[in-house]
Image (spheres, grey):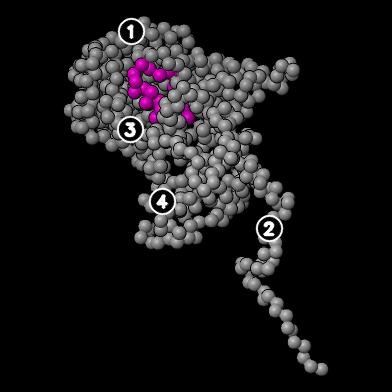
Amino acid sequence: MGSTVNTRNERPIVPEGFDGSRATHRREHPDDWRFSDVERQAVWRAIEERRDIRKFRPDSIPDELLSRLLGAAHAAPSVGLSQPWRFIVVRDEATRSVMQAAAQRERMNQSRYFSGRSTQFLDLKIEGIREAPVSICVCCDRGDPDVEVLGRHTVRDADIYSTCLAIENFWLAARAEGVGVGWVSFYEPAELSELLSLPANVVPIAWLCVGYPDERPSRPGLESNGWDRRSAVGQVIFSERWGHVERDDSEAPVGVKMALQSNVAPWCAQLLERVRPGEVAAGITVRDVEDELVKPLGSLGVLEGVVQQWAVATGAPPPRDMKPAILVFAGDHGVSTHQVSLFESRVSSQIAVAAARGATAIGVLARSHDAALSVVDVGLSGERAPGVIDRRVACATSDISRGAAMTHDELRRAVQTGYVEARAMVRDCDVLIVGEIGIGNTTVAAALLAALTRSSARDVCGRGTGLDAQGLDRKRAIVEEALRINTPDAGDALECLRRVGGFEFAALVGAMFAAGEARRPILLDGFATGVAALAACRLQPALRDYLIAGHRSAELAHARVLDELGLEPLLDLRLRLGEASGAALAFPLVKLAATLHAEMESFDDARVDKART
């Protein structure tokens, strides 16, 4: 029998990973690469239902699931197969606290650019950095500029576009797995690079909040919140040529750099280590309750945020019978000899004595709130003030226009004095109201704000107690000279405080550390206390969890301070009194917010007419 010869041209077996399809089959069945009907429906559903999530549950994401999502991102297409994406998984509470502070600050900055819509904008929730159990900073490693990458010769940003495709892969895979993703873009890229120690050739593309969603939006959040509406697809498709005039977006808000601290003096580091971040999960629990109350979601505006902030700080909702304590620090300033105020330095002691005996606004308000009031002399000049607690570090600071305000030892003593005084008070109160007294302290506050934010004197100096135009020019000149002489470094908040601050500012910083350590909310007063809080937050970003802005004062730069802190004030009455009076006036709102939260019925409990609802 002769041998059988195989005359058919059979296709050899193709190794795994190579295309095994044949041209004839592809020609006859060009659509055969598609998924099954069920598979396609799942893909389209993921695309159509992908949402930018802002509210998260605190439950952790399993490591295996997160690894698979990152694997999906890594499977994205990239120019020249460069795979330029890098993923920094951030779980550290302190790092996320810094990032949240930056985002909230930029939120306040941008609100000013929405003419007529700033309130609507502020009602929007823009981030869930602290609520989500994990954040991912997606970066693009731009590589060596001298190394040629296929496809990137003329389109230099193709690596960034590739990184965005990785983000979309991650997002769609997350949606399929029931995981929420929120893209946060409220930050300064250089600031984020510093926070995460990114090399010069690596740029941050996105900060993603990742966690199980605490909302199930059926359409984009900005659409459901009435901010804007989606365009019809026909409006964005053109044939052959561009179809309409391009919109001019040349003007964009300019952010303010926020210095991030790297190291501090050992004595200060000990205080900072005692301040821990608040409990974001407690805030979410409070939000859960508020969502069930008989009212439209978010209808109590800033008050709902106050209740949530209180819960983050203390771990529980605010009590209806909350007990306040008021702590006011008094000090004089060498710079006041340059007529930067309408009043002489001796007036500081007079006001402090009157406040201590209950004769000024803060004394009246303290009695009204049945609050303990302490007025502490940390740096007044002249004779000791009767009735005022004597903790004087020195008789006024040095003239900041000629050199540093304090020695290193004076700064340490002032901060520690504030810490000790507040630590004693917070044992017997639910909330600490802070303020200051000191002629010339708006000049010092302006200089300290300029130092911390790298601003000019013109941007931060206001009229204070009522300076005329000539007085304002004189004040600006003094601040400019103080900045020139002291050359403060915005990256070293403690040294900025020493060089251009004041004793009462340093004491306020210490007091805030003590309140944060004890997990007590801090109700801020005006411009000076706000600047002190900014310095404290630069040293310990976790402190921001404990801050509530009582009011926005008439001093124009106070708005800048609140923006830097990312805080919305409860009141805006054009006050410029100081001594914690504005914060004390705001206290009833905090108390009423607590009462509303505790006493309003939920939809489950209330007898609500279903036809009307």
Give the image location of residue 547, x and y in percent. 45, 26
Residue 453 numbered tag: 3
Q: Residue furthest bottom?
A: 1
Real-space CA distance between mark 2 and mark 4, rounded to the nearest whole angstrom = 41 Å
Q: On residue 31, which mark appears?
A: 2
* Picture coordinates of residue 422, whole percent (x, y): 41, 23
Question: Is disc 2 placed on a helix, strand or loop?
Answer: loop
Q: Choose mark 2 or mark 4, whichever is in front.
A: 2
In this picture, which residue range is highlighted in magenta? 543-564
The location of residue 140, given as percent across then percent down, is: 45, 51
Q: Earlier in the sequence, mark 1 or mark 3?
A: 1
Q: Quadrant of residue 301?
A: top right
Q: Name which of mark 4 and mark 3 comes first in the sequence.
A: 4
Query: Residue at left 66%, top 24%?
Result: 292
Task: Please state which amino acid type lies under the numbered disc 1.
Answer: Ala
Q: Nearer the viewer, mark 2 or mark 3?
A: 2
- Indicate the secondary structure of the residue bearing disc 4: strand
Tally the numbered discs. 4
Q: Label 2, label 3: how many angstroms apart (C-alpha)? A: 59 Å
- The residue located at (52%, 35%) in the rendering is 127
Question: Image point 41% across, 53% down: which residue?
Answer: 156
Q: In terms of sequence position, does the residue under pointer 2 or pointer 3 come before the other?
A: 2
Instruction: Give the residue type at disc 4.
Output: Val
Which residue lies under the disc numbered 1?
Answer: 354
